[in-house]
Image (tube, coloured by chain):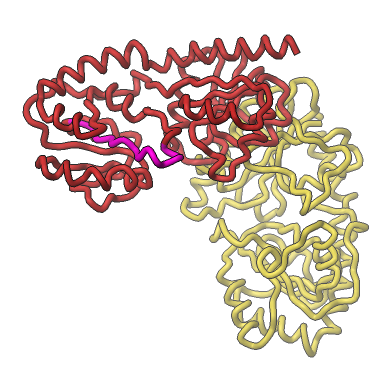
Chain colours: A red, B yellow
Amino acid sequence: MNIGMVTMQFYDNRPKDSVGSSRIRGDWISKYWDGCEGYKTGKKYDVMIFQKAYWEDMVKSFKGIKVFDICDPDWLEHRPVIEIIRNCDGVVTSSEALAKQIRKFDIGEKPVLHIPDRVDMEWSKPIHGEHKGVAKKCVYFGYSGNARVVLDATVDPIRSMGIELTVISDQPYHSADHFVKYDPETVNEEIVRHDFVLLPNAPSSNYRFKFKSDNKTLQAWALGMPVVHDGEDLKRFMDGSEREMERVLRLKEVKEKWDVRVSVKEWKLFIKELIEIRGKN
Amino acid sequence: MALVPVGHQYELANMSFIGQYDLLINPYRTWGTKSRPMPDNMKMVDHYEKGKYDFAILHLDQQCVNSRVGKGELYKQVNEVIQDIPKIVINHMTPLHDSLPDAEVVKRVKELVGDNFMIVNTHKARKMWGWGKTIIHGMDPDDWKSKPKEPRATIYVSGGGMEKAYKREILRNTINLLNEWGFKFYWIGIDVKFATFDEYREWLSRSLIYMNLSHQSPRPRARTEAMLSGCCIITNRHQDADTFIKNGKNGFLVDEDPVQVATLVSELLTSRCAEAKKIGEVGRKFAQKQFSRKNFEKQWLEVLKEVGV
């Protein structure tokens, strides 16, 4: 079976490695799925996956199995979410919240499956060595727009503990001690120079944030980095032995549950289901 | 017949010997029905079907050497997918690149083209690339009418990109001068926009002057369309223009000098408008013979024979 993966990065003609979701939900899936590849114009496929790619012409023309993979509430950005889904056989989402919301939309009888973001262990290098001593440096990574929303309320407690904050992002954050321009080639090396990753919980009142997946937490764990979400985590991970326990525990968990190869298995089953539904219809 | 998305499809699909003409759906280029109606023998397809087509047409230009440019990626992908029929590459530009030396661009384009057959659209461009075959485009003369002329000057060139090739500062400086002198100049796509092909043709058919100041865009189709519409052509001498424009007879040849160009335009719009009208008509008759569909088809048939179709 030939499967063509159309990522948003490809469809929107963005630079290589510039779109996280294209890498996590597109490239990594193709990498571990025999028969699946980044879409090539003109090639004949049996199945096409549109990963956040709003390619209406193709979705309407292609006669094979079509799946729309969505990882953000793009209907808030005037994207034709319903039109695309109605022309596909099924939908895959990055979070359960997205799946629940989409099932309520006017999409007909389309199967909607939640396949979480996972990590490519080969990409998750280098891994932090043993954590020791009192934490001194923490790091946040992510889009600058999100940084403003989640970091503003967190900076003061971090400072009061005497911890330096590095922000890895597309644009500087006003209260960071250090700013590192995001570069997919070096981001992991930058992250592991710190004692923990700071990923504060998003405000629960924000509609958009309720659909976010926890891919950054998984990325951090896969690098051997404890993640601080709230004040309790902060207190706990000041201590080196706690961070080391967390590192060992989460690395094990990531390998067992959050390896992207698990997602590939789920994808295969879903495609099989969609083919069966086509057969019945 | 297999065709892969390129510009200038309208005349290609309308050639008398073309049967079915399919375009590959792709993320970067689509058929703009506002610009041209889709010919009856054309349709969009979502994949290339081996054995269904006689030849394929691909498109590239000097920008394709940059891997981040979508059309370059498109070329590479389609070139990889189609392996069983002759591939003809249309390259309607020159090696003049915004950031790379000509020799480097030629080298990289040569690698991209490989064994495919490359078509350019002026003899000068062929010389600059160092290989390829020149096809001078042609259109159906009946598609372009000449009507009583409004005293206006116009141009149709994209608003941005490939600055070295288009050298738009000459155009902008010329327009600024005309504005200073109280004249209005119409840049199609910026000052005037058209909802349909008919509206565009109507505009040209009623425009007295058409100006081409693109530095090294070899053979702008809009200039030919304007010529067929009876506009008085003012063009620079680059890219063989001086081989078909006889200065003061069927158009005007100018240097890259905004003062010279603006002066000429202002005169032709006022004291010399009867002369402009006459020259436009001479140019139209010349273009109907020289840039005809018949000539265009003849050149294409030679190419198809050469690639073994």
Residue A167 screen position, x and y as percent: 26, 43
Q: From this view, report whether residue A121 is shown above or below residue B214.
A: above
Residue B54 location in percent, x, y? 80, 28
Q: Position of residue A141 (x, y in %)?
A: 30, 38
Quadrant of the frame with the N terminus of chain A: top right
Please indicate whether residue B96 sits to the left or right of residue B89 in the image: left
Camera sees residue A84: yes
Decide which of A126, A264 is in the foreground and name it. Answer: A264
Residue furthest left as drawn = A133
Report the residue at 44% width, 29% height from top: A23
Picture quarter containing residue A123? top left
Q: Residue at x 90, y 69 (%)?
A: B146
> Is B225 situated left or right of B16 in this image?
left
In the image, residue A197 lies in the stretch drawn in magenta = yes
Q: Is residue A266 positioned above or below B63 on the image?
A: above
**Front-most of A167 and B173?**
A167
Name the residue: 67% across, 22% down.
A109
In terms of image quadrants, where is residue A165? top left
B280 horizontally vs B190: left or right: right
Furthest toward the front, the residue is A205
- The stretch of residues the image draws in magenta is A196-209
Main secondary structure of the magenta stretch? loop
Q: Is residue B307 visible?
A: no
Quadrant that contains the C terminus of chain A = top right
Locate residue B196, reporting x and y percent.
Answer: 80, 57
